[in-house]
Amino acid sequence: MCSVPSLTLSLIYLSLIGGTNWSPMEVMIGSISRLSLISMPQTVCIKVPDTYDWPLYMLRDVFVTVTLQTPQVGYMDEVRPISPLVSVIVRDLAFRQLPDRIENMPSLCMHDKTTSENSFSFERFLALFYPRVSESSKTLTNVNEVNFTLHAFPYSCLVVCRATNQPSVPLTLLVNSTSAFNEMNVLKFALGLLLLVFSDYLSQTITFYYFSGVGMAIFGSLVIALLIFVRMLPLRRSGTVLQGLFILLGSTFSLSCMLLEYVRSTVFDLLAANVEYTTIYVVTVALLSFIFLYWFHLPDMLISRYPRTLVVMKYLLRLIGATLLIHSLYLPFDEATLADLLLSVFFNRLGSKIDQAQSWSPTMASYAPRMIRLLFVILIVLLVDLCECWRLFPSKHKRRRRKSDWLPSVESDNPVSSTFIPGSPWASSSPYGEPAIVTPRYQPRKSGHFIPIYVPRSARGDFASGTHYGSEKKYDHHSRRSIGPYGNGYYRSSTYSYDLLTDDED
Protein backbone atom coordinates (compact mmCIF):
# COMPACT_ATOMS: atom_id res chain seq x y z
CA MET A 1 0.00 0.00 0.00
CA CYS A 2 2.93 2.32 0.58
CA SER A 3 4.07 2.03 -3.02
CA VAL A 4 0.96 3.77 -4.39
CA PRO A 5 1.49 7.09 -2.51
CA SER A 6 5.19 7.08 -3.37
CA LEU A 7 4.35 6.48 -7.01
CA THR A 8 1.82 9.33 -6.92
CA LEU A 9 4.34 11.69 -5.32
CA SER A 10 6.94 10.82 -7.92
CA LEU A 11 4.46 11.55 -10.69
CA ILE A 12 3.60 14.93 -9.13
CA TYR A 13 7.28 15.78 -8.75
CA LEU A 14 8.07 14.89 -12.33
CA SER A 15 5.11 16.91 -13.58
CA LEU A 16 6.35 19.95 -11.63
CA ILE A 17 9.86 19.81 -13.02
CA GLY A 18 8.46 19.43 -16.52
CA GLY A 19 10.14 16.13 -17.34
CA THR A 20 13.43 15.59 -19.10
CA ASN A 21 14.88 13.16 -21.57
CA TRP A 22 16.72 10.22 -20.10
CA SER A 23 18.86 7.25 -21.07
CA PRO A 24 18.79 3.85 -19.34
CA MET A 25 21.74 2.30 -17.57
CA GLU A 26 23.73 -0.03 -19.79
CA VAL A 27 25.51 -3.26 -18.91
CA MET A 28 28.14 -4.68 -21.23
CA ILE A 29 27.94 -8.31 -22.30
CA GLY A 30 30.43 -10.54 -20.51
CA SER A 31 30.69 -8.42 -17.36
CA ILE A 32 29.35 -8.28 -13.80
CA SER A 33 27.79 -4.95 -12.84
CA ARG A 34 26.64 -3.66 -9.47
CA LEU A 35 23.80 -1.14 -9.63
CA SER A 36 22.21 0.81 -6.80
CA LEU A 37 18.43 0.93 -6.91
CA ILE A 38 17.96 4.46 -5.66
CA SER A 39 14.55 4.97 -7.23
CA MET A 40 11.91 2.73 -8.72
CA PRO A 41 11.38 1.82 -11.48
CA GLN A 42 14.92 1.30 -12.67
CA THR A 43 15.86 0.30 -16.20
CA VAL A 44 18.94 -1.69 -17.18
CA CYS A 45 19.77 -2.40 -20.84
CA ILE A 46 22.17 -5.02 -22.16
CA LYS A 47 24.62 -3.43 -24.57
CA VAL A 48 26.95 -5.20 -26.99
CA PRO A 49 30.52 -3.87 -27.28
CA ASP A 50 29.93 -2.19 -30.65
CA THR A 51 27.41 -2.10 -33.47
CA TYR A 52 30.03 -3.43 -35.88
CA ASP A 53 30.20 -6.61 -33.79
CA TRP A 54 26.78 -7.67 -35.05
CA PRO A 55 28.20 -10.63 -37.06
CA LEU A 56 29.60 -12.01 -33.79
CA TYR A 57 26.28 -11.78 -31.95
CA MET A 58 23.71 -12.39 -34.68
CA LEU A 59 23.45 -16.07 -33.66
CA ARG A 60 24.06 -15.61 -29.93
CA ASP A 61 21.77 -15.38 -26.94
CA VAL A 62 22.50 -13.27 -23.89
CA PHE A 63 22.08 -15.01 -20.53
CA VAL A 64 21.46 -12.60 -17.65
CA THR A 65 21.52 -13.57 -13.98
CA VAL A 66 20.09 -10.99 -11.58
CA THR A 67 20.72 -11.04 -7.82
CA LEU A 68 19.33 -8.67 -5.19
CA GLN A 69 21.33 -7.61 -2.14
CA THR A 70 20.11 -5.79 0.95
CA PRO A 71 22.06 -4.24 3.85
CA GLN A 72 22.48 -6.22 7.04
CA VAL A 73 20.44 -5.01 10.00
CA GLY A 74 21.77 -7.29 12.72
CA TYR A 75 23.07 -10.71 13.65
CA MET A 76 21.32 -13.83 14.83
CA ASP A 77 23.15 -15.49 17.72
CA GLU A 78 26.04 -13.12 16.92
CA VAL A 79 27.09 -15.44 14.10
CA ARG A 80 24.69 -15.35 11.16
CA PRO A 81 23.67 -11.96 9.68
CA ILE A 82 20.00 -11.30 9.06
CA SER A 83 18.38 -9.07 6.43
CA PRO A 84 14.78 -8.08 5.78
CA LEU A 85 12.97 -10.03 3.08
CA VAL A 86 12.61 -7.71 0.10
CA SER A 87 11.20 -8.59 -3.31
CA VAL A 88 11.10 -6.74 -6.61
CA ILE A 89 9.53 -7.50 -9.98
CA VAL A 90 11.87 -7.77 -12.95
CA ARG A 91 10.51 -7.61 -16.47
CA ASP A 92 12.32 -8.05 -19.76
CA LEU A 93 11.06 -6.06 -22.71
CA ALA A 94 12.25 -4.73 -26.02
CA PHE A 95 14.14 -1.47 -26.32
CA ARG A 96 11.38 0.11 -28.41
CA GLN A 97 8.94 -0.22 -25.51
CA LEU A 98 10.82 2.25 -23.30
CA PRO A 99 9.31 5.75 -23.02
CA ASP A 100 11.15 8.76 -24.36
CA ARG A 101 10.73 10.92 -21.26
CA ILE A 102 11.44 10.15 -17.65
CA GLU A 103 7.97 11.16 -16.45
CA ASN A 104 6.53 8.22 -18.38
CA MET A 105 8.73 5.67 -16.63
CA PRO A 106 6.24 4.76 -13.84
CA SER A 107 3.82 3.52 -16.50
CA LEU A 108 6.05 0.47 -16.99
CA CYS A 109 5.08 -0.81 -13.55
CA MET A 110 1.40 0.11 -13.56
CA HIS A 111 0.24 -2.65 -15.86
CA ASP A 112 1.99 -5.96 -15.61
CA LYS A 113 1.19 -8.52 -18.30
CA THR A 114 0.95 -12.02 -16.92
CA THR A 115 0.44 -14.83 -19.38
CA SER A 116 -0.13 -18.45 -18.57
CA GLU A 117 2.38 -20.94 -19.89
CA ASN A 118 -0.33 -23.50 -20.65
CA SER A 119 -2.64 -21.19 -22.54
CA PHE A 120 -2.30 -21.15 -26.29
CA SER A 121 -1.74 -17.96 -28.22
CA PHE A 122 -0.95 -17.14 -31.79
CA GLU A 123 2.32 -15.50 -30.74
CA ARG A 124 3.51 -18.71 -29.06
CA PHE A 125 2.84 -20.65 -32.26
CA LEU A 126 4.71 -18.10 -34.38
CA ALA A 127 7.58 -18.12 -31.89
CA LEU A 128 8.64 -21.42 -33.47
CA PHE A 129 9.59 -19.60 -36.67
CA TYR A 130 11.01 -16.22 -35.62
CA PRO A 131 13.14 -15.01 -32.71
CA ARG A 132 11.30 -14.53 -29.45
CA VAL A 133 10.64 -11.11 -27.98
CA SER A 134 9.58 -11.97 -24.44
CA GLU A 135 7.64 -9.82 -22.00
CA SER A 136 7.73 -12.09 -18.97
CA SER A 137 7.86 -10.98 -15.35
CA LYS A 138 9.73 -12.66 -12.52
CA THR A 139 9.81 -11.98 -8.81
CA LEU A 140 13.28 -11.42 -7.37
CA THR A 141 14.07 -11.57 -3.66
CA ASN A 142 17.25 -11.23 -1.66
CA VAL A 143 17.34 -15.00 -1.11
CA ASN A 144 17.11 -16.17 -4.72
CA GLU A 145 18.18 -15.18 -8.23
CA VAL A 146 16.38 -14.98 -11.56
CA ASN A 147 17.67 -15.81 -15.03
CA PHE A 148 16.70 -14.29 -18.36
CA THR A 149 17.54 -15.33 -21.91
CA LEU A 150 17.61 -12.28 -24.17
CA HIS A 151 18.73 -11.51 -27.69
CA ALA A 152 21.66 -9.19 -28.34
CA PHE A 153 20.10 -7.15 -31.16
CA PRO A 154 18.25 -4.92 -30.82
CA TYR A 155 19.13 -3.97 -27.27
CA SER A 156 17.09 -5.78 -24.63
CA CYS A 157 16.25 -4.13 -21.34
CA LEU A 158 15.24 -5.14 -17.83
CA VAL A 159 12.82 -3.05 -15.79
CA VAL A 160 12.93 -3.38 -12.00
CA CYS A 161 9.70 -2.45 -10.19
CA ARG A 162 9.14 -2.37 -6.45
CA ALA A 163 6.66 -4.91 -5.16
CA THR A 164 3.81 -3.96 -2.81
CA ASN A 165 4.15 -3.89 1.00
CA GLN A 166 7.92 -3.71 0.93
CA PRO A 167 10.10 -1.70 3.34
CA SER A 168 12.04 1.19 1.91
CA VAL A 169 15.62 0.01 2.23
CA PRO A 170 18.59 0.63 -0.09
CA LEU A 171 18.95 -2.18 -2.58
CA THR A 172 21.82 -3.31 -4.78
CA LEU A 173 21.33 -5.20 -8.01
CA LEU A 174 23.99 -7.57 -9.32
CA VAL A 175 23.73 -8.22 -13.07
CA ASN A 176 25.89 -10.96 -14.58
CA SER A 177 25.61 -11.20 -18.38
CA THR A 178 27.19 -13.80 -20.66
CA SER A 179 26.61 -14.84 -24.26
CA ALA A 180 26.56 -18.19 -26.04
CA PHE A 181 25.52 -19.55 -29.40
CA ASN A 182 21.92 -20.58 -29.83
CA GLU A 183 22.14 -24.14 -31.17
CA MET A 184 18.75 -23.97 -32.86
CA ASN A 185 19.61 -20.70 -34.62
CA VAL A 186 22.95 -22.10 -35.79
CA LEU A 187 21.21 -25.19 -37.17
CA LYS A 188 18.58 -23.12 -38.97
CA PHE A 189 21.26 -20.80 -40.38
CA ALA A 190 23.37 -23.67 -41.73
CA LEU A 191 20.37 -25.48 -43.21
CA GLY A 192 19.02 -22.32 -44.82
CA LEU A 193 22.40 -21.45 -46.33
CA LEU A 194 22.79 -24.95 -47.77
CA LEU A 195 19.32 -24.82 -49.30
CA LEU A 196 20.05 -21.44 -50.90
CA VAL A 197 23.37 -22.55 -52.37
CA PHE A 198 22.34 -26.03 -53.56
CA SER A 199 18.69 -25.36 -54.48
CA ASP A 200 19.39 -25.60 -58.21
CA TYR A 201 21.41 -28.79 -57.80
CA LEU A 202 18.86 -30.45 -55.52
CA SER A 203 15.94 -29.57 -57.79
CA GLN A 204 17.63 -31.39 -60.69
CA THR A 205 18.74 -34.44 -58.70
CA ILE A 206 16.38 -37.39 -58.79
CA THR A 207 17.76 -38.65 -55.47
CA PHE A 208 16.38 -35.58 -53.72
CA TYR A 209 12.87 -36.39 -54.97
CA TYR A 210 13.20 -39.94 -53.69
CA PHE A 211 14.27 -38.72 -50.24
CA SER A 212 11.48 -36.14 -50.25
CA GLY A 213 8.96 -38.86 -51.04
CA VAL A 214 10.35 -41.03 -48.27
CA GLY A 215 10.12 -38.13 -45.80
CA MET A 216 6.53 -37.38 -46.76
CA ALA A 217 5.65 -41.05 -46.39
CA ILE A 218 7.20 -41.19 -42.92
CA PHE A 219 5.43 -38.03 -41.75
CA GLY A 220 2.07 -39.07 -43.18
CA SER A 221 2.32 -42.56 -41.75
CA LEU A 222 3.20 -41.14 -38.33
CA VAL A 223 0.11 -38.93 -38.34
CA ILE A 224 -2.11 -41.84 -39.43
CA ALA A 225 -0.56 -44.17 -36.86
CA LEU A 226 -1.06 -41.53 -34.17
CA LEU A 227 -4.73 -41.16 -35.10
CA ILE A 228 -5.24 -44.93 -34.98
CA PHE A 229 -3.32 -45.26 -31.72
CA VAL A 230 -5.28 -42.50 -29.98
CA ARG A 231 -8.50 -44.01 -31.32
CA MET A 232 -7.69 -47.27 -29.55
CA LEU A 233 -6.98 -45.53 -26.24
CA PRO A 234 -9.77 -44.65 -23.79
CA LEU A 235 -9.02 -40.96 -24.21
CA ARG A 236 -12.24 -39.66 -25.66
CA ARG A 237 -11.22 -36.05 -25.41
CA SER A 238 -7.90 -36.49 -27.19
CA GLY A 239 -9.47 -38.81 -29.74
CA THR A 240 -12.20 -36.30 -30.49
CA VAL A 241 -9.70 -33.49 -30.96
CA LEU A 242 -7.44 -35.50 -33.23
CA GLN A 243 -10.33 -36.92 -35.25
CA GLY A 244 -11.48 -33.39 -36.02
CA LEU A 245 -8.15 -32.49 -37.64
CA PHE A 246 -9.44 -31.88 -41.12
CA ILE A 247 -12.68 -30.34 -39.88
CA LEU A 248 -10.99 -27.74 -37.72
CA LEU A 249 -8.49 -26.89 -40.44
CA GLY A 250 -11.38 -25.57 -42.46
CA SER A 251 -12.71 -23.43 -39.60
CA THR A 252 -11.21 -20.36 -38.00
CA PHE A 253 -7.49 -19.75 -38.18
CA SER A 254 -7.00 -19.62 -34.40
CA LEU A 255 -8.54 -23.07 -33.94
CA SER A 256 -6.31 -24.41 -36.71
CA CYS A 257 -3.21 -23.04 -35.01
CA MET A 258 -4.36 -24.46 -31.68
CA LEU A 259 -4.84 -27.88 -33.25
CA LEU A 260 -1.43 -27.80 -34.92
CA GLU A 261 0.19 -26.88 -31.61
CA TYR A 262 -1.65 -29.70 -29.84
CA VAL A 263 -0.74 -32.29 -32.49
CA ARG A 264 2.89 -31.18 -32.50
CA SER A 265 3.25 -31.45 -28.72
CA THR A 266 1.43 -34.79 -28.64
CA VAL A 267 3.56 -36.29 -31.41
CA PHE A 268 6.80 -35.14 -29.82
CA ASP A 269 5.82 -36.50 -26.43
CA LEU A 270 4.89 -39.91 -27.83
CA LEU A 271 8.03 -40.16 -29.96
CA ALA A 272 10.32 -39.13 -27.10
CA ALA A 273 8.73 -41.63 -24.72
CA ASN A 274 9.23 -44.58 -27.13
CA VAL A 275 12.56 -44.01 -28.85
CA GLU A 276 13.28 -47.67 -29.72
CA TYR A 277 9.90 -48.37 -31.29
CA THR A 278 10.00 -45.04 -33.10
CA THR A 279 13.39 -45.83 -34.66
CA ILE A 280 12.26 -49.27 -35.83
CA TYR A 281 9.04 -47.82 -37.25
CA VAL A 282 10.81 -45.01 -39.11
CA VAL A 283 13.42 -47.33 -40.64
CA THR A 284 10.77 -49.84 -41.75
CA VAL A 285 8.50 -47.22 -43.31
CA ALA A 286 11.44 -45.51 -45.02
CA LEU A 287 12.63 -48.78 -46.57
CA LEU A 288 9.17 -49.80 -47.77
CA SER A 289 8.39 -46.36 -49.19
CA PHE A 290 11.73 -46.23 -51.02
CA ILE A 291 11.10 -49.66 -52.57
CA PHE A 292 7.62 -48.56 -53.62
CA LEU A 293 8.88 -45.33 -55.20
CA TYR A 294 11.78 -47.08 -56.93
CA TRP A 295 9.65 -49.93 -58.25
CA PHE A 296 7.03 -47.70 -59.86
CA HIS A 297 9.41 -44.81 -60.76
CA LEU A 298 7.06 -42.22 -59.32
CA PRO A 299 9.60 -39.34 -59.10
CA ASP A 300 10.76 -40.01 -62.67
CA MET A 301 7.20 -40.02 -63.94
CA LEU A 302 6.48 -36.78 -62.08
CA ILE A 303 9.43 -34.98 -63.65
CA SER A 304 8.87 -36.40 -67.14
CA ARG A 305 5.16 -35.54 -67.22
CA TYR A 306 5.48 -32.18 -65.47
CA PRO A 307 8.88 -30.62 -66.32
CA ARG A 308 8.00 -27.40 -64.51
CA THR A 309 8.31 -29.37 -61.27
CA LEU A 310 12.04 -28.60 -61.38
CA VAL A 311 11.43 -24.84 -61.43
CA VAL A 312 8.77 -24.99 -58.72
CA MET A 313 10.96 -27.14 -56.49
CA LYS A 314 13.96 -24.85 -56.99
CA TYR A 315 12.12 -21.72 -55.89
CA LEU A 316 10.38 -23.60 -53.08
CA LEU A 317 13.76 -24.67 -51.70
CA ARG A 318 15.02 -21.11 -51.99
CA LEU A 319 12.02 -19.76 -50.11
CA ILE A 320 12.49 -22.31 -47.34
CA GLY A 321 16.22 -21.59 -47.16
CA ALA A 322 15.75 -17.81 -47.06
CA THR A 323 13.06 -18.15 -44.38
CA LEU A 324 15.31 -20.31 -42.20
CA LEU A 325 18.23 -17.96 -42.77
CA ILE A 326 16.37 -14.75 -41.91
CA HIS A 327 14.53 -16.19 -38.91
CA SER A 328 17.75 -17.52 -37.40
CA LEU A 329 19.42 -14.10 -37.20
CA TYR A 330 19.03 -11.26 -34.73
CA LEU A 331 18.76 -8.19 -36.95
CA PRO A 332 20.81 -5.13 -35.89
CA PHE A 333 17.80 -2.79 -36.04
CA ASP A 334 14.27 -2.57 -34.78
CA GLU A 335 11.69 -3.91 -37.23
CA ALA A 336 8.96 -1.59 -35.97
CA THR A 337 11.14 1.49 -36.51
CA LEU A 338 12.03 0.37 -40.02
CA ALA A 339 8.37 -0.36 -40.79
CA ASP A 340 7.34 3.12 -39.60
CA LEU A 341 10.06 4.66 -41.74
CA LEU A 342 8.99 2.76 -44.85
CA LEU A 343 5.35 3.60 -44.18
CA SER A 344 6.17 7.29 -43.80
CA VAL A 345 8.11 7.29 -47.07
CA PHE A 346 5.20 5.55 -48.78
CA PHE A 347 2.68 8.11 -47.56
CA ASN A 348 4.99 10.97 -48.49
CA ARG A 349 5.21 9.63 -52.03
CA LEU A 350 1.44 9.52 -52.21
CA GLY A 351 1.15 13.06 -50.89
CA SER A 352 -0.71 12.04 -47.73
CA LYS A 353 -0.17 13.26 -44.22
CA ILE A 354 2.06 11.59 -41.68
CA ASP A 355 -0.87 11.33 -39.29
CA GLN A 356 -2.23 8.42 -41.30
CA ALA A 357 1.02 6.55 -40.83
CA GLN A 358 1.07 7.39 -37.13
CA SER A 359 -2.42 5.91 -36.71
CA TRP A 360 -1.05 2.61 -37.98
CA SER A 361 1.76 2.52 -35.40
CA PRO A 362 0.07 -0.03 -33.04
CA THR A 363 -0.54 -2.37 -35.96
CA MET A 364 3.00 -1.89 -37.24
CA ALA A 365 4.43 -2.61 -33.80
CA SER A 366 2.72 -6.01 -33.69
CA TYR A 367 3.15 -7.13 -37.31
CA ALA A 368 6.35 -5.29 -38.24
CA PRO A 369 8.81 -8.12 -37.35
CA ARG A 370 7.02 -10.62 -39.57
CA MET A 371 6.46 -8.20 -42.45
CA ILE A 372 10.04 -6.94 -42.48
CA ARG A 373 11.45 -10.45 -42.35
CA LEU A 374 9.11 -11.51 -45.15
CA LEU A 375 10.44 -8.61 -47.22
CA PHE A 376 14.01 -9.72 -46.55
CA VAL A 377 13.11 -13.30 -47.56
CA ILE A 378 11.83 -12.07 -50.93
CA LEU A 379 14.93 -9.92 -51.44
CA ILE A 380 17.25 -12.84 -50.68
CA VAL A 381 15.44 -15.09 -53.17
CA LEU A 382 15.69 -12.40 -55.86
CA LEU A 383 19.37 -11.85 -55.09
CA VAL A 384 20.16 -15.55 -55.40
CA ASP A 385 18.24 -15.67 -58.68
CA LEU A 386 20.22 -12.71 -60.05
CA CYS A 387 23.49 -14.34 -59.00
CA GLU A 388 22.49 -17.51 -60.81
CA CYS A 389 21.65 -15.57 -63.98
CA TRP A 390 24.99 -13.77 -63.80
CA ARG A 391 26.83 -17.07 -63.37
CA LEU A 392 25.09 -18.68 -66.33
CA PHE A 393 25.50 -15.65 -68.61
CA PRO A 394 28.74 -16.01 -70.64
CA SER A 395 31.08 -13.09 -70.22
CA LYS A 396 33.22 -11.49 -72.93
CA HIS A 397 36.32 -13.13 -71.51
CA LYS A 398 34.75 -16.58 -71.83
CA ARG A 399 33.67 -15.90 -75.42
CA ARG A 400 37.14 -14.61 -76.29
CA ARG A 401 38.79 -17.69 -74.85
CA ARG A 402 36.50 -19.85 -76.96
CA LYS A 403 38.00 -18.30 -80.12
CA SER A 404 41.62 -18.38 -78.98
CA ASP A 405 44.39 -20.34 -80.69
CA TRP A 406 44.41 -23.32 -78.35
CA LEU A 407 41.74 -25.05 -80.47
CA PRO A 408 43.03 -28.22 -82.18
CA SER A 409 43.85 -28.10 -85.85
CA VAL A 410 42.27 -30.12 -88.64
CA GLU A 411 44.27 -32.22 -91.09
CA SER A 412 42.39 -31.94 -94.38
CA ASP A 413 42.87 -30.92 -98.00
CA ASN A 414 40.58 -27.93 -97.60
CA PRO A 415 42.63 -24.83 -98.54
CA VAL A 416 40.07 -22.43 -97.10
CA SER A 417 40.20 -23.25 -93.42
CA SER A 418 42.27 -25.79 -91.55
CA THR A 419 41.49 -24.75 -87.98
CA PHE A 420 37.69 -25.01 -87.93
CA ILE A 421 36.10 -28.20 -86.76
CA PRO A 422 33.11 -29.14 -88.92
CA GLY A 423 29.66 -28.70 -87.48
CA SER A 424 26.61 -30.96 -87.39
CA PRO A 425 26.57 -31.96 -91.11
CA TRP A 426 29.81 -33.87 -90.59
CA ALA A 427 28.35 -36.29 -88.05
CA SER A 428 29.09 -39.99 -88.36
CA SER A 429 25.73 -40.61 -90.07
CA SER A 430 25.89 -37.64 -92.45
CA PRO A 431 25.97 -38.38 -96.22
CA TYR A 432 27.97 -35.27 -97.07
CA GLY A 433 31.37 -36.56 -96.29
CA GLU A 434 33.63 -37.93 -93.65
CA PRO A 435 34.77 -36.06 -90.52
CA ALA A 436 38.23 -34.67 -90.44
CA ILE A 437 41.07 -36.22 -88.50
CA VAL A 438 41.80 -34.07 -85.48
CA THR A 439 45.26 -34.03 -83.97
CA PRO A 440 46.07 -32.37 -80.64
CA ARG A 441 48.63 -29.98 -82.15
CA TYR A 442 47.87 -27.16 -79.72
CA GLN A 443 47.44 -27.57 -76.02
CA PRO A 444 45.25 -25.41 -73.81
CA ARG A 445 46.77 -22.54 -71.89
CA LYS A 446 45.11 -23.55 -68.65
CA SER A 447 44.01 -26.88 -67.33
CA GLY A 448 40.34 -27.64 -67.17
CA HIS A 449 39.45 -27.06 -70.86
CA PHE A 450 38.23 -30.00 -72.87
CA ILE A 451 40.12 -30.86 -76.07
CA PRO A 452 38.55 -33.34 -78.47
CA ILE A 453 41.39 -35.76 -79.30
CA TYR A 454 39.58 -37.35 -82.22
CA VAL A 455 36.30 -37.28 -84.09
CA PRO A 456 34.79 -40.67 -85.00
CA ARG A 457 35.39 -41.52 -88.63
CA SER A 458 32.57 -42.56 -90.91
CA ALA A 459 32.63 -45.52 -93.29
CA ARG A 460 30.89 -43.50 -96.00
CA GLY A 461 33.45 -42.36 -98.59
CA ASP A 462 36.51 -40.21 -98.19
CA PHE A 463 36.40 -36.65 -96.92
CA ALA A 464 39.19 -35.54 -99.24
CA SER A 465 37.30 -36.71 -102.35
CA GLY A 466 33.92 -35.39 -101.26
CA THR A 467 32.54 -31.93 -100.71
CA HIS A 468 34.99 -29.78 -98.81
CA TYR A 469 34.10 -27.59 -95.84
CA GLY A 470 34.62 -23.88 -96.01
CA SER A 471 33.70 -21.04 -93.70
CA GLU A 472 33.19 -18.42 -96.42
CA LYS A 473 32.44 -20.53 -99.47
CA LYS A 474 29.15 -19.89 -101.28
CA TYR A 475 27.24 -22.56 -103.14
CA ASP A 476 24.95 -22.11 -106.12
CA HIS A 477 21.63 -23.70 -105.29
CA HIS A 478 19.92 -24.95 -102.15
CA SER A 479 22.78 -24.01 -99.89
CA ARG A 480 22.16 -24.20 -96.17
CA ARG A 481 24.08 -22.70 -93.32
CA SER A 482 25.72 -25.08 -90.85
CA ILE A 483 26.01 -23.87 -87.28
CA GLY A 484 28.34 -26.00 -85.24
CA PRO A 485 29.86 -25.63 -81.79
CA TYR A 486 33.22 -24.40 -83.15
CA GLY A 487 32.38 -22.40 -86.25
CA ASN A 488 29.91 -21.52 -88.97
CA GLY A 489 30.06 -22.85 -92.52
CA TYR A 490 28.01 -23.79 -95.55
CA TYR A 491 27.36 -27.15 -97.07
CA ARG A 492 25.60 -28.05 -100.30
CA SER A 493 22.39 -29.98 -100.28
CA SER A 494 22.68 -33.09 -102.42
CA THR A 495 20.73 -33.46 -105.69
CA TYR A 496 20.55 -37.21 -105.49
CA SER A 497 18.03 -38.95 -103.30
CA TYR A 498 20.32 -41.78 -102.34
CA ASP A 499 22.83 -39.34 -100.86
CA LEU A 500 20.27 -38.28 -98.24
CA LEU A 501 20.18 -41.72 -96.68
CA THR A 502 21.95 -42.21 -93.37
CA ASP A 503 23.67 -45.24 -91.94
CA ASP A 504 20.55 -46.18 -89.98
CA GLU A 505 18.31 -46.25 -93.07
CA ASP A 506 17.93 -48.97 -95.70
Image (tube, helix red, strand yellow):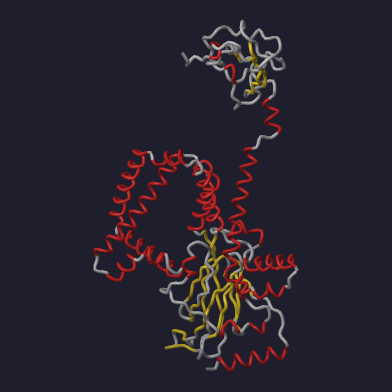
Identity of the residue furthest to the right in this view: 351
Indicate the position of residue 173 as horizontal and vertical percent values: 56, 78
Q: Is residue 207 above or below residue 406?
A: below
Q: Quadrant of residue 219?
A: bottom left
Q: Nearer the viewer, residue 199 or 160?
A: 199
In this picture, residue 63 sits left or right of residue 394: left
> Where does the image place residue 486, in percent across and percent down from the top left?
64, 22
Camera-side residue of 239 and 24: 239
Task: Identify which residue, 283 or 49, lies in the foreground.
Answer: 283
Check the image and report above or below for 493 versus 181. Answer: above
Outermost residue, top side: 465
Q: Position of residue 324 (x, y in %)?
A: 52, 55
Residue sitting at x 68%, y 27%: 401
Give the side of residue 209 with respect to residue 442, left or right. Answer: left
Q: Quadrant of residue 118?
A: bottom left
Which residue is drawn at the image coordinates 72% and 82% (left, top)?
Answer: 20
